[in-house]
């Protein structure tokens, strides 16, 4: 059975969902997105994704194509229609489809922004990982507004391919000697039980999972330091991990082939994953 997806006001079977070839998301990567995870059929951290979406749109002067209530309702309806128990909801808003290709933004009164949403089922998403992942380091050559969650994901995709070619699962990007983030996640190390992660700025995405995990860590009396770190410091750390809406808290066990700690998922990372899942389920909507 095919998925039911949402395109500009309509719920459709995925094979009938269509977007214009003039859509600026397609031609110019002129669009933003959010991925909200679903656990036990509930939306996780929805409020954070909603707020970040509004900010991404506002930074790009792009109109919100539906009300907040409508967008929440579409999320819920898609989860219900597709029987998603564990997985996620992908949302994308682009600057719509003007009559022709043009670098200048179209008049929003003439060209409304476009909204597409679909679900992805991932049974077993919340299971405890038996192994951590390996990462490699690559230079961060992305644009300077990584705080905006745009659909310009070519370099992150290339990073994943470089990782794959090296027998790793992901790449940590490095700029001026310091790790910015993973290709689709925020990066952390643990040293003497202190959790270290890069401070927020235009250089990284303000992860919704990051915000929740740091809050839970502080509530659990763990020490948190927000600052950049190098690959060498990370290789010498006791633990490393990444966070995102699709991986929650995922241990990293090697960086550029150097084993981290004892090479097994770290205690702090696994504890944070447990707390995050427990609290997110309680607060899920
Ligand atoms: N990626 N940094 C980058 C570059 C990301 O693409 C993501 C999320 C994160 C983590 O943000 P959050 O905790 O809000 O998911 C950090 C999503 C999951 C994706 O592109 O699929």
Image (spheres, rainbow, N blue to C red):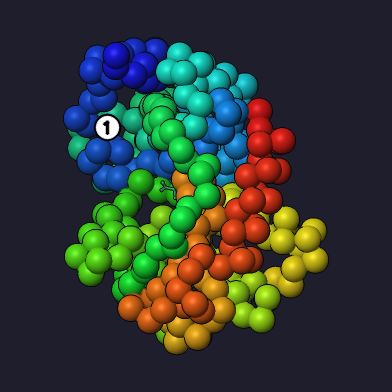
Q: Residue at x 24, y 14 (%)?
A: 16
Q: Residue at x 56, y 25 (%)?
A: 41
- Number of marks in the image? 1
Q: Residues within 10 Å of mark 1 (few under 14, many from 20)?
A: many
Check the image and report above or below for 63 versus 200: above
Q: Is residue 216 visible?
A: yes
Q: Which of 121 and 43 lies nearest the eye of the viewer?
A: 121
Relative placement, left or right, of 170 versus 56 is left
Which quadrant would residue 235 be assigned to in this image?
Answer: bottom left
Relative placement, left or right, of 256 versus 89 is left
**Quadrant of the rendering where the C terminus is positioned:** top right
Which quadrant would residue 45 be assigned to in this image?
Answer: top right
Residue 183 placement (x, y as % from top left): 38, 60
Judged from the image, the secondary structure of the residue bearing numbered disc 1 is loop
- Residue at the disc numbered 1: 23
Check the image and report above or below for 256 versus 37: below
Q: Is residue 61 visible?
A: no
Which quadrant would residue 238 be assigned to in this image?
Answer: bottom right
**Quadrant of the rendering where the N terminus is positioned:** top left
Residue 274 placement (x, y as % from top left): 64, 51
Residue 4 placement (x, y as % from top left): 36, 16
Residue 263 placement (x, y as % from top left): 45, 74
């Amino acid at each position: 059975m095919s998925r039911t997806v949402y395109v500009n006001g309509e719920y459709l079977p995925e094979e009938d969902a269509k977007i214009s070839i003039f859509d600026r998301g397609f031609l110019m990567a002129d669009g933003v997105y959010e991925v909200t995870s679903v656990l036990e059929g509930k939306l996780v951290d929805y409020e954070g994704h909603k707020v970040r979406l509004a900010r991404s749109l506002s930074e790009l002067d792009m109109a919100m194509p539906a009300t907040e209530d409508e967008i929440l309702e579409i999320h819920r309806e898609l989860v219900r229609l597709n029987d998603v128990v564990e997985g996620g909801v992908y949302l994308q808003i682009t600057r719509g489809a003007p009559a022709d290709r043009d670098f200048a933004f179209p008049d929003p009164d003439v060209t409304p922004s476009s909204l597409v949403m679909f679900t992805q089922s991932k049974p077993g998403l919340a299971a405890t990982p038996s192994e951590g992942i390996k990462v490699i380091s690559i230079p961060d050559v992305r644009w300077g507004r990584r705080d905006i969650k745009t659909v310009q994901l070519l370099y992150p995709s290339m990073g994943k391919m470089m990782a794959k070619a090296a027998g790793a699962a992901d790449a940590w990007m490095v700029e001026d000697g310091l790790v910015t983030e993973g290709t689709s996640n925020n990066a952390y190390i643990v040293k003497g039980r202190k959790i270290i992660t890069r401070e927020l700025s235009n250089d990284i995405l303000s992860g919704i999972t990051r915000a929740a995990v740091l809050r839970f860590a502080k509530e659990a009396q763990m020490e948190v330091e927000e600052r950049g770190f190098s690959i060498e410091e990370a290789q010498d750390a006791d633990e490393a991990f990444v966070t995102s809406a699709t991986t929650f808290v995922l241990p990293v066990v090697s960086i550029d082939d150097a084993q981290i700690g004892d090479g097994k998922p770290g205690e702090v990372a696994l504890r944070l994953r447990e707390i995050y899942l427990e609290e997110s389920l309680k607060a899920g909507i």
